[in-house]
Amino acid sequence: MLGSLAAGVVGEAAYGIEASRLAAELQPDVVLLHVEEPLAVALRTLELVQRAAPRATPLVVSRLGDGNLVWASDYPHVDAIFPGAVKQTLELLAPLSAASRARVLGENARRLYGLA
């Protein structure tokens, strides 16, 4: 079955308005969105494209890197709704190198808030 599938690039856009115009015109099966900073612009582009081509499946990729991620949790505050957040995050980050885990779990936040 997979041998009978064909794929190709039918359009390429640099920004949101152009992307939504092309999506409306081409009505693709899949839309690939590469998320870079600022995230709000990328999310708005995704929203516009989904309105223009509602049947398209969005595939979102990013290469932000571990130097741009900050992790935090409200647990064990009384309003926390996800008490396993710490354990599950540590499990998800386990395959990363010790240096990457250190950046995501603390070093980036210290740098962001000038505490380094």
Image (cartoon, rainbow, N blue to C red):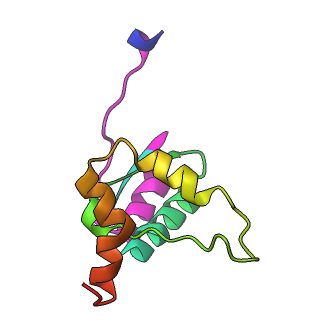
The quadrant in which residue 36 appears is bottom left
Whether residue 109 is situated above or below residue 6 in the rendered picture: below
Apparent side of residue 62 relative to residue 82 in the rendered image (left or right): left
Provide residue 58's location: percent of width, then percent of height: 49, 48
Depth check, front residue: 97 or 63: 97
Identify the residue at image location x=36%, y=67%.
69
Say if residue 36 shows up in the picture: no
Q: Position of residue 66 (x, y in %)?
A: 28, 60
Q: What's drawn in magenta, residue-wise?
A: 4-30
The residue at 41%/68% (across/down) is: 42
Residue 110 sits in which quadrant?
bottom left
Residue 11 seen: yes
Q: Tell me: residue 3, above or below residue 12.
A: above
Residue 14 is one of the magenta-drawn residues:
yes
The quadrant of the rendering that contains the C terminus is bottom left
Q: Position of residue 88 (x, y in %)?
A: 56, 50
Question: Count the marks: how many?
Answer: 0
**Residue at coordinates 44% horizontally, 76% vertically from top-left?**
40
Is 21 a magenta residue?
A: yes
Horizontally, residue 3 falls left or right of residue 91, namely left
x 39%, y 69%: residue: 16
Q: Position of residue 101 (x, y in %)?
A: 33, 57
Q: Is 81 rendered above or below residue 3?
A: below
Q: Report the residue that reaches farthest toward the bottom.
A: 114
Residue in front for this viewpoint, 4 or 92: 92
